[in-house]
Each structure stands twice: as structure tokens, then as C-alpha cells.
Image (cartoon, rainbow, N blue to C red):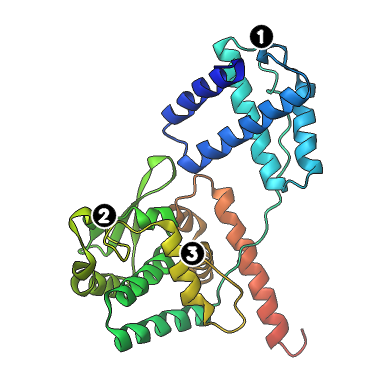
């Protein structure tokens, strides 16, 4: 095992013990470190102990030249600072050379959001499909889209739902978000009705011995995977006129925006979405303002 491979293995074990990090974040951080180590090799650096801030800046500059998004560059700076802090603590570095590294501000793009009427049309078309087909998969697909829009849940959270996570008394679901943090999310009557129809009249036809407690199942009875959920949502929203290709995250964005437009306060939306920082939730206030301005320009005679 080479010098860098040994460090990578130890750092991987360290990240996996950090309960606050999601699987996706760990994967991204390790990808950044692999890229950094490759850069060190091309710069002629064979030992971590002689790495300087200039080596780090060369790596980041190369990422920028090759067209890295600002948000990705921002994450890479955070990622390498976490690594150098750990490496200094473990004695691989004599001091934390990444501590003074500035983090470039990520450019936040406004997310794609459905209008309230488009969301209603999508739900109504799914309900019509259920009435026409009366098939288990149509009931499942309807429940998936209704729950995603009602809850603003992430795809991974929806796929991880178990039967015991549904509270029929309070009309809520319990999801496990980033960093294994649990939260309760309220569901409206349409979502609960679609979920109930799937569980009572659809799931049992697909369920197999390997289905365990999973709420949503694939066609063969195993717990549904994220790719299938994305396909379901793409197809459900593809029928809408003027709507570009939108996936499950668009339903999350739409749920957040429609909650704020309906009068929900920012803290409530933060709690529902499971954002660690209120700053992440605040982007939806910009979305709402942009939509308000667009509606004003279209509707007001002196706009």
C-alpha cells in the first residue's frame, strides 16, 4: 500500500465514523481527496508532510480552469480544509496548512418550481390514471408523487420509509435525513389517501418475502430504488405543458415555495425540509419574490 493509499484508507475510516455526514457527502469528500492526491503526484509531491498551501491552490486553480462550478469549488475548499485539519492532528502535517484557505462563495441558482396549478394538474392526472388502470404500480406512482409534493422529502428519505414510520393518528411520516437525523413531516389528506390506497390495495400484490417493512416497492417486490422514483416523477410531470424535464427535487422545491407563498414561516419550512442551516431555506424566499414579480408583470396593466 502506497503512502497516499494508506492515508486515504485512514481518512475514509475517519469520515465514516462522523455520524453528521451523509453517504453522499463522504463520497464527495473522498472524490475531492483523490483528485487532490492526483494533483500532488503531477506536481511532483510524493509525501504529504511536504505539502504546502501553494500545492492546494494549484489544485483548486486547475479545477476552476477546467470549468468547475462555483458551488463545487466551494465544497472542495471546505473538503480540503477538513482533511488538512485531520492530517495535522494525526501528525502527517506539522501544521494545519489549509486553515487559512478562503472558501469561495458558491453561486446559488434558483431551483425549478412548478406552479400551484401545474402541481394540481399533475396530481389529478395521476389520480385519473389510477381510476383507469386500477393497477398496483399506478397506485404506487400516485402515492410517491403525492407524498414527495406534500412532504418536500428527499428521494433517499422516501426510499427509506418503513411501514412503522407512518402515523395515521397524526397524519405524519417519520423520515431519516442527512446525518441520520430523524424528523416528523405532516401530510395532507390527498397524500394520506393515496398512500393508504397503495398500502391497502396495491402493495400486497407486489410484496414478496424480501419486501420487509419498506413502504414503497419496485416491480419485483424489493425496496424501491432512487432511480425508479426519479423515472416515476419524470413521467408524471412530462405531461405538463411548458414544463421542462423535472425530477423529484423539483417537487421538494415546489413544496417549499408553495408553503412560503401560502404563509408558512421560514423556520417551519426549514424544519419540514430538514435543512441544517436557515440560509439554505432562505433561497425559497428569492424564488417566491421572483414568481411574484413575474405574476405582477403579467397581470398589472401598468407593470
Q: Earlier in the sequence, mark 3 or mark 2?
A: 2
**Residue drawn at 77 percent across, 87 percent down:** 302
Percent x, y for residue 24? 50, 43
Percent x, y for residue 15? 48, 29
Residue labelled with disc 2: 162
Q: Compare residues 193 and 10 and report the one nearer the observer.
A: 10
SS assignment at label 1:
loop
In this view, 156 is above or below 221: above
Residue labelled with disc 3: 248
Percent x, y for residue 62? 79, 36
Q: How many marks?
A: 3
Q: Quadrant of the C terminus?
A: bottom right
3 and 2 marks in contact (CB < 8 Å):
no
SS assignment at label 2:
loop
Name the quadrant containing residue 198: bottom left
Q: Using the image, tell me which numbered label, if any, was put on residue 94.
A: 1
SS assignment at label 3:
helix
Name the quadrant containing residue 211: bottom left
Instruction: Give the Cα separation between the discs numbered 1 and 2.
Output: 48 Å
- Left or right? Give the position of 35 relative to 86: right
Amino acid at each position: 500500500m502506497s503512502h497516499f493509499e494508506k492515508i486515504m484508507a485512514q481518512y475514509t475510516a475517519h469520515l465514516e465514523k462522523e455520524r453528521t455526514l451523509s453517504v453522499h457527502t463522504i463520497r464527495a469528500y473522498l472524490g475531492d481527496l483523490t483528485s487532490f492526491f492526483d494533483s500532488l503526484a503531477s506536481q511532483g509531491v510524493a509525501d504529504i508532510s511536504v505539502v504546502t498551501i501553494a500545492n492546494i491552490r494549484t489544485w483548486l486553480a486547475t479545477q476552476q480552469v477546467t470549468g468547475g462550478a462555483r458551488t463545487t469549488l466551494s465544497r472542495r475548499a471546505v473538503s480540503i480544509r477538513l482533511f488538512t485539519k485531520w492530517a495535522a492532528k494525526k501528525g502527517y502535517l506539522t501544521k494545519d496548512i489549509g486553515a487559512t484557505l478562503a472558501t469561495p462563495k458558491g453561486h446559488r441558482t434558483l431551483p425549478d418550481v412548478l406552479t400551484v396549478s401545474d402541481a394540481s394538474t399533475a396530481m389529478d392526472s395521476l389520480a385519473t390514471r389510477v381510476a383507469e388502470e386500477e393497477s398496483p404500480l399506478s397506485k404506487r406512482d400516485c402515492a410517491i408523487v403525492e407524498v414527495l409534493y406534500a412532504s418536500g422529502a428527499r428521494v433517499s428519505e422516501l426510499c427509506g420509509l418503513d411501514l412503522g414510520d407512518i402515523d395515521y393518528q397524526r397524519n405524519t411520516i417519520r423520515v431519516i435525513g442527512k446525518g441520520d437525523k430523524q424528523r416528523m413531516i405532516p401530510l395532507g389528506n390527498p397524500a394520506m389517501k393515496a398512500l393508504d390506497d397503495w398500502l391497502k390495495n396495491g402493495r400486497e400484490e407486489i410484496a414478496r418475502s424480501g419486501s420487509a417493512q419498506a413502504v414503497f416497492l419496485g416491480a419485483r417486490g424489493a425496496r424501491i430504488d432512487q432511480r425508479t422514483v426519479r423515472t416515476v416523477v419524470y413521467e408524471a410531470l412530462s405531461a405538463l405543458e411548458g414544463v421542462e424535464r423535472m425530477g423529484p427535487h423539483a417537487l421538494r422545491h415546489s413544496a417549499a415555495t408553495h408553503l412560503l407563498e401560502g404563509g408558512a414561516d421560514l423556520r417551519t419550512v426549514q424544519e419540514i425540509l430538514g435543512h441544517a442551516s436557515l440560509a439554505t431555506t432562505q433561497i425559497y424566499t428569492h424564488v417566491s419574490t421572483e414568481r411574484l414579480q413575474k405574476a405582477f408583470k403579467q397581470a398589472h396593466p401598468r407593470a
